[in-house]
């Protein structure tokens, strides 16, 4: 299968592209604007692979989108490109509206025109998979879970922009007949994660002996899914999902932020015992504005309909993630010394 993946040099995108090409043998065109969070090194294993090509272009560039579709002739589009960091969305919401809303509309328009040009037989198998987040549903009460029927209630500029993009994707299906699928996932973790997010930021801070800043009281809860489990889930939705449907992909690993950081410290104590205990580095800092208290996903629909389920055990996979960063300084060192040094973002309200 030929698949165009937007945002393929990002964290989730690169895991997906590697899975599609190396594990499944698909032909992939990575379409990526190479913004600050993209890293071409993530796709270095595919440098000489004839089944992979990369186009450096912006999803807001209508001509570039149409050209890529016309030249590559994909049988599916997997749309992952997005601005994704809540803290950055507080500081610069306009960038999130541009990429996540206008960019998604541009992709949908391009895919629609391309789809309408296909022979009838190819139309039947074409899919547009829009990848989103559980943050669009807002904050949960204790012990509750999101389902595909949950009401949208975004609380941050990031989640609001993603909610808008979800609605656009569904509207293009209902209005124009584009065969759309939508997924909403929980927090991802694993290798090749840009170090502005909680887990990679804490890993690099611990590695450098810096403080581990925990927002508020550390009791904000998130469901954690390993990025490789997520990549498998996206493929399952693409291959077996029902057109027009939404599927929630979660890791069934709800942890509060303080528990995550303590588990990370325990992993460091085992892997770098000379600096133990790493919990001494934990510090509590002012909370993020509008910080949602709990996200948690019930992924029963995906498990039941698609035969997919998360395979990674959180604490074991978290330690493997720590080990990856310890072993791959060449991946993160240029980032840490260049475009992001670990400073706090999102305080400009």
Image (cartoon, grey):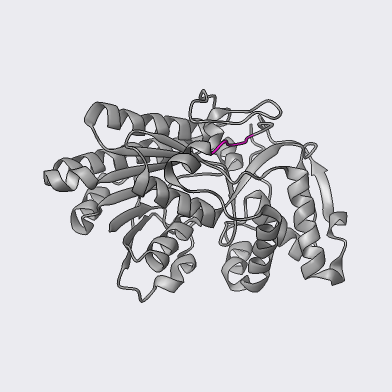
User: Residue 83 location, x and y as percent?
Assistant: 49, 44
Circle count: 0
Give the residue at x 46% y 47%: 307
- Residue 32 belongs to magenta span: no
Relative to 197, 162 lies left or right: left
Relative to 223, 27 lies left or right: left
User: Residue 190 location, x and y as percent?
Assistant: 59, 58
User: Residue 157 location, x and y as percent?
Assistant: 53, 32
**Magenta stretch bounds:** 295-299
Give the residue at x 67% y 49%: 198
Relative to 16, 170 lies left or right: left
* In the image, residue 141 above or below residue 69: above
* In the image, residue 271 above or below residue 102: below
Give the residue at x 12% y 43%: 120
Name the residue nearer the viewer: 338 or 240. Answer: 240
Give the residue at x 68% y 58%: 318
- Image quadrant where one finds the C terminus: top right
Q: Is residue 218 visible?
A: yes
Instruction: Check the image and name the residue furthest to the bottom.
Output: 48
User: Residue 77 location, x and y as percent?
Assistant: 31, 49
Name the residue nearer the viewer: 6 or 27. Answer: 27
């Amino acid at each position: 299968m030929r698949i165009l993946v937007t945002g393929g040099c990002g964290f989730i995108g690169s895991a997906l592209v590697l899975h599609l090409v190396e594990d499944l043998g698909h032909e992939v065109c990575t379409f990526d604007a190479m913004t600050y969070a993209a890293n071409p090194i993530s796709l270095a294993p595919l440098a000489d692979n004839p089944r992979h090509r990369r186009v450096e272009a912006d999803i807001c560039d209508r001509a570039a989108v149409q050209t890529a579709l016309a030249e590559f002739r994909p049988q599916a589009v997997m749309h992952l490109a997005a601005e994704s960091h809540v803290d950055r969305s507080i500081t610069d919401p306009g960038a999130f509206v541009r990429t996540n809303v206008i960019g998604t509309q541009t992709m949908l328009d391009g895919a629609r025109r391309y789809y309408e040009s296909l022979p009838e037989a190819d139309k039947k198998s074409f899919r547009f998979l829009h990848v989103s987040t559980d943050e669009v549903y807002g904050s949960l009460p204790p012990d509750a879970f999101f389902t595909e029927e949950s009401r949208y209630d975004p609380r941050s500029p990031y989640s609001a922009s993603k909610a808008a993009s979800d609605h656009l994707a569904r509207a293009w299906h209902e209005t124009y007949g584009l065969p759309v699928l939508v997924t909403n996932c929980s927090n991802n973790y694993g290798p090749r994660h840009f170090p502005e997010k909680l887990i990679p930021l804490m890993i690099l801070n611990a590695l450098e002996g810096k403080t581990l800043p925990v927002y508020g009281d550390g009791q904000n809860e998130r469901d954690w899914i390993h990025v490789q489990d997520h990549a498998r889930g996206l493929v399952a939705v693409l291959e077996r999902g029902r057109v027009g449907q939404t599927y929630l992909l979660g890791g069934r690993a709800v942890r509060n932020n303080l528990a995550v950081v303590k588990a990370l410290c325990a992993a460091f104590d085992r892997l770098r015992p000379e600096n133990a205990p790493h919990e001494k580095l934990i510090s509590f800092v002012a909370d993020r504005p509008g910080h949602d208290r709990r996200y948690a996903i019930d992924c029963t629909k995906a498990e039941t309909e698609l035969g997919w389920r998360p395979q990674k055990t959180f604490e074991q996979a978290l330690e493997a993630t720590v080990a990856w960063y310890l072993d791959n300084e060449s991946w993160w060192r240029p980032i840490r010394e260049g475009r992001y040094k670990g400073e706090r973002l999102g305080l400009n309200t």
